[in-house]
Image: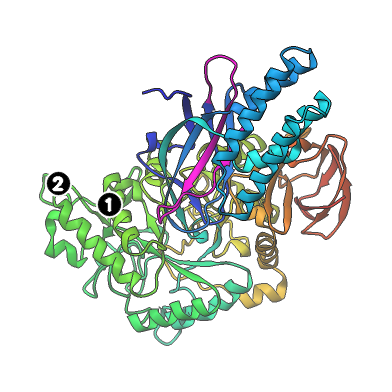
């Protein structure tokens, strides 16, 4: 049914309110609605947040936008849990009276009548103000004083009108509005997570490669362990990362094991792919014996925690042919016409060492076993899961699993690794995934970067939080293969500033860029299939590492709250087709934080151009100027609406500018 004062087209709303909008504690977001009524009477509109405890937060009045009948307000939830919000509309007798009174009295029409009606409106308003609080008592006193002046005919008419329309009266009615014919639309669901669901820097490495060594006597490789991998954690923390993500740490299958570069002929000591999970040593709840024991894993997690790092664990719901589930529950897999179990395929790729789960044969059995596995790792300190290929499992399963975990462990975060169709990526986010991989690695030109950052921050941000990984064990983009060191700096600068969450896979800082073959995005000698120890110390001594740059980027992110938010990105223009410019701004108790990012996305050539800032979007008039400081080089300039830039990728391809007071 249409309300007395209609409210339509409320946003953000996900699937008509069937799923919650996403936010984290302290994150502001904008609620918009179309509100209108018949005739010329004034109306008001506002939004009310209701917290997890069921208590309403103070009304936030919506302000009218440039679009007719469109209103907006910014709201900020302050604690985790299940929230809701509703939009309210009402008749505003004071605004209606004031509009008419100021016109009529100026024209000497119905002067005393208009003043009398104003007095009646303020009387009604005063009667609705609660007198219990000091603010309420002060507002009542203000309204009484205004009425007293308005009815005193010894004062001239302009003075009496001024008393009824004074800034003090307006302020009192803003705090305690007179609302009649009150209507509401909603409530609409909102879920508020802990801040790590939105903001963080991820670092991925394979524990088995850290400390791996070649045993010349045995003519074979020796795997690294959790103990040797823990020695890498201090360097990861010093680079400013918040999350260390581990690929699967479980026993690896012997049957159909893959050799180096995904070959089908492994040597006896080839370790196989960690994603081929399960062997005689156990399955998804077990530790690969080469890495150590469950106690060793607990020590690794504790060591990471002591350095301020959270451990993210890979959740890959697939099995090697010798996984215990294959023998115990053959119905959990797909049997082909010849009686064999189907292995995984993503044509033209084949994964002979992996059996996908079939949820349709025993849905309850599979889902409860997965829930048991997830809770097992939660009990061992894992609060973040990176989920491998979630788009190959039923969406309703993820809605159930994530819902069950949220009931008992609402701080646990799930990252969706789904490079698939947009509808599926959105659906996975909609049903509960806290973060999502994106198409970022394939967005490299100016137009691609600008449009994609706008999409992530404004079009999909109410439901999908992006995690911008610059590379992964599966993705070595053509841009990195042929762009040289500048390409690595460019992609890191965009990822670290364009999204609150970004990620790096080990080797990125060493400029690893050689593909297995032309046209492929697979690394040569991929770490997915072999041990890959790296000489971190030697690279640092020789200056062949991007680690200092990554450290600087993460430091900038931590010092600038604007870079820790998603919905606050504005794209600006430039005259060059390789210069990207965007800004992020947020308001805190300490003041306004503004960061302007200018990047040359051409790693091969110096570019100079003029950047044109949308100053009103930054809260400035078009003639204003201000000082900017490059957080990378420490140089400062005075900027305004139009600004010359020159970016040499061999020196520094990006400006990350903090705005200082003029």
| Quarter-of-image position of residue 1 | top left
Q: Nearer the viewer, mark 1 or mark 2?
A: 1
Q: Quadrant of residue 184?
A: top left
- Identify the residue under disc 1: 400
Q: Position of residue 75 (x, y in %)?
A: 56, 46
Name the outermost residue toward the bottom: 217
**In this rendering, would 201 be left or right of 186?**
right
> Considering only vertical position in the picture, is 309 above or below 612?
below
Under circle 1, the secondary element is helix
Please tell me whether mark 2 sits on a helix, a strand or a loop.
loop
Q: What is the x, y in percent for residue 389?
A: 36, 51
Of residues 358 and 367, the one nearer the viewer is 367
Q: Is residue 66 visible?
A: no
Query: Residue at the location (30% across, 45% down)?
Result: 395
Q: Magenta includes 29?
A: no
Q: Residues within 10 Å of mark 1 (few under 14, many from 20)?
A: some
Residue span colored magenta: 35-64
Which residue, given by chain and number where applicable, does mark 2 sit on? 336
């Amino acid at each position: 049914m249409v309300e007395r004062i209609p409210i339509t087209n409320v946003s953000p709303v996900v699937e008509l309110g069937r799923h919650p909008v996403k936010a984290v504690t302290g994150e502001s977001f904008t609620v918009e609605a179309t509100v209108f009524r018949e005739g010329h009477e004034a109306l008001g509109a506002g939004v009310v947040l209701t917290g997890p405890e069921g208590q309403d937060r103070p009304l936030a009045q919506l302000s009218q936008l440039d679009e007719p009948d469109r209103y907006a307000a910014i709201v900020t939830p302050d604690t985790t849990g299940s929230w809701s919000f509703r939009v309210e509309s009402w008749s505003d007798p004071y605004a209606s009276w004031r509009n008419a009174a100021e016109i009529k009295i100026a024209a000497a029409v119905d002067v005393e009548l208009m003043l009398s009606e104003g007095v009646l409106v303020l009387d009604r308003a005063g009667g609705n103000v609660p007198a219990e609080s000091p603010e309420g008592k002060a507002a009542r006193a203000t309204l009484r004083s205004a009425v007293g002046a308005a009815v005193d005919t010894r004062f001239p008419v302009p003075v009496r009108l001024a008393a009824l329309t004074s800034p003090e009266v307006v302020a009192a009615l803003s705090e305690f509005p007179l609302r009649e014919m009150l209507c509401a639309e909603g409530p609409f669901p909102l879920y508020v997570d802990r801040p790590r669901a939105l903001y963080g820097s991820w670092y991925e490495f394979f524990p088995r490669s850290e400390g791996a060594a070649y045993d010349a006597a045995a003519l074979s490789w020796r795997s690294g362990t959790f103990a040797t991998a823990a020695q890498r954690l201090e360097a990861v923390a010093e680079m400013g990362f918040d999350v260390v993500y581990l690929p699967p740490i479980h026993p690896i299958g012997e049957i159909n094991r893959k050799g180096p570069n995904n070959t089908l002929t492994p040597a006896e000591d080839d370790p196989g792919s960690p994603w081929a999970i399960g062997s005689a040593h156990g399955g998804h709840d077990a530790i690969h014996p080469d890495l150590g024991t469950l106690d060793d894993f607990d020590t690794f997690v504790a060591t990471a925690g002591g350095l301020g790092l959270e451990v993210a664990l890979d959740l890959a719901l697939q099995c090697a042919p010798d996984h215990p589930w294959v023998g115990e529950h053959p119905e959990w897999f797909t049997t082909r016409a010849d009686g064999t179990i189907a292995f995984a395929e993503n044509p033209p790729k084949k994964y002979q060492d992996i059996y996908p789960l079939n949820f349709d044969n025993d849905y309850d059995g599979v889902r409860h076993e997965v829930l048991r596995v997830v809770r097992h790792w939660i009990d061992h300190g894992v609060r973040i899961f990176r989920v491998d290929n979630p788009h190959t499992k039923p969406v309703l399963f993820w809605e159930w699993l994530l819902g069950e975990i949220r009931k008992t462990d609402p701080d646990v975060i799930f990252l969706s690794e789904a490079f698939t169709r947009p509808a599926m990526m959105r659906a996975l986010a909609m049903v509960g995934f806290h973060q999502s991989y994106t198409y970022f690695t394939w967005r490299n030109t100016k137009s691609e970067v600008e449009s994609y950052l706008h999409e992530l921050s404004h079009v999909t941000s109410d439901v999908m939080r992006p995690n911008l990984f610059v590379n992964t064990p599966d993705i070595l983009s053509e841009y990195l293969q042929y762009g040289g060191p500048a390409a690595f700096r460019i992609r890191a600068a965009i990822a670290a500033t364009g999204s609150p969450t970004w990620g790096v896979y080990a080797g990125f800082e060493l400029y690893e860029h050689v593909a297995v073959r032309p046209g492929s995005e697979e690394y040569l000698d991929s770490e997915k299939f072999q041990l890959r120890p790296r000489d971190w110390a030697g690279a640092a001594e020789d200056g062949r590492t991007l680690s200092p740059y990554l450290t600087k980027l993460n430091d900038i992110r931590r010092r600038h709250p604007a870079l820790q938010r998603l919905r606050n990105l504005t794209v600006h223009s430039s005259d060059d087709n390789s210069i990207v410019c965007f800004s992020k701004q947020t308001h805190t108790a300490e003041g306004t934080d503004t960061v302007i990012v200018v990047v040359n996305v051409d790693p091969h050539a110096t570019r100079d151009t003029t950047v044109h800032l949308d100053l009103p979007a930054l809260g400035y008039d078009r003639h204003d100027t201000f000082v900017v400081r490059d957080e990378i080089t420490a140089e400062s300039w005075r900027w305004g609406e139009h600004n010359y830039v020159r970016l040499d990728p061999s020196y520094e391809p990006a400006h990350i500018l903090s705005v200082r007071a003029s």
